Image (spheres, grey):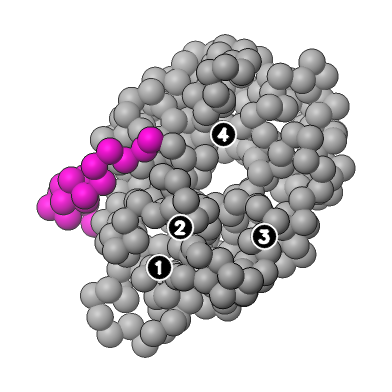
Amino acid sequence: MKRLLIVSILAVLTFAIGGCNKGKISNPLEPSNVYPGPSNSNSRQDESLYEWLPYVVVHTPGDALSAYQVAIPELMATGALRGVRVGIIKGEGRNIINSWLASTGLDILWIFDNYFLFEPDIEAAVDQAMALYPGIRYLQIGNEATTIIPRNEPQISIERYMDVLKRIYNHVQARYSNTILVTQSTFGSGGHGSSELERMIELGLREMSPSKLIVGMNVYSLSTANRYSHVISGSLRGYRVWVTETGTTNPDEHIRYVRDIYPVLRNNLRAERIYWYCLYCGDSGPDVGFGLIKNLQGQSFWSSPLYNLLAGRR
């Protein structure tokens, strides 16, 4: 899900330390969404984790299952993990990790893969996803749909995306009334995402009920959060907001990022949920540093300082 985000996260964090509003959170969160914090807190580092919300993005490569079967229960045991965000990939079928996650009791946000959005019979594609994982409570329709697909493949405009979203919304209301949709996560860097969200409003986003639709966005910098804040506090005031990806590539900055950036996302964006990107981001490539774990060897793995604190590893 990630690419060339966070050009200079250290500079952003330096600004955050001096300028973040760390006052009272303006939107009360449900008790199930609040991490109780580490037990026996006796340091500034420990106290920072009271800002943590217990949600994480989880990728699903088959060789990660053994490590997940250690890491995820370990985080759940401390209350640091209550929900995950995972993908339903077009053409993949029932994924072994997704199936295991569904058995853990975690609150799952399922991502309806971008490539489904090109299906002529989009309603049948939704039915297919629902059949793979019955009882889906939260279904996100795409992720950075207009920007993440490689340029040599078919592209989807925001206008076309909204046409598809409306069809899915109507179908879900008719057949899956207990399912709540989440919009695609708009782009997490710069001003593109906020502009796209404004365009989604113009194209009829507010025709969908706030009780049946949650606004999703990826946010990787304070400047991006500030751009989103205007839209969220205006036209979308009545809608719930989930930040579905955030984080930093430097493991040594993970804890400070939670301490300094999470309050901004909660206060300025009314973010009810914040999903850390991600639990395991691979062992090579630009995303590795985001991961809470890496270097998977069966049930053994390297864990970041943030993971160690969340899991109670000292």
Foreground residue among 109 and 241: 109
**Mark whose residue sits in front, 1 or 4:** 1
- Tell which tag, 4 or 3, sits nearer the viewer: 3
Q: Which residue is mark 2?
A: 291
Tell me the CA gap for discs 1 and 4. Answer: 26 Å
Residue 114 in the image: above or below residue 306: above
Q: Amino acid at mark 3?
A: Asp
Q: Tell me the SS state at disc 4.
A: loop
Callout 4 amino acid: Asn
Between the residue at mark 4 and the residue at mark 2, the CA separation in whole angstroms equals 19 Å
Image point (81%, 25%), residue name: 123
Q: Residue 41 appears in which quarter of the rendering?
A: bottom left
State which tag comes first along the sequence, 1 or 4.
4
Label 2 SS: loop
Which comes sooner in the sequence, label 1 or label 3? 3
Tell me the crowding category of disc 4: few under 14, some 14 to 19, or many 20 or more residues within 10 angstroms, Cα based. Answer: many
Q: Are marks 1 and 2 in contact (CB under 8 Å)?
A: yes
Q: Which residue is mark 1?
A: 304
The magenta-colored residue range is 4-22
Give whichever of discs 1 and 2 has the lower sequence position. 2
Query: Residue sitting at 48 percent across and 30 percent down?
Result: 186
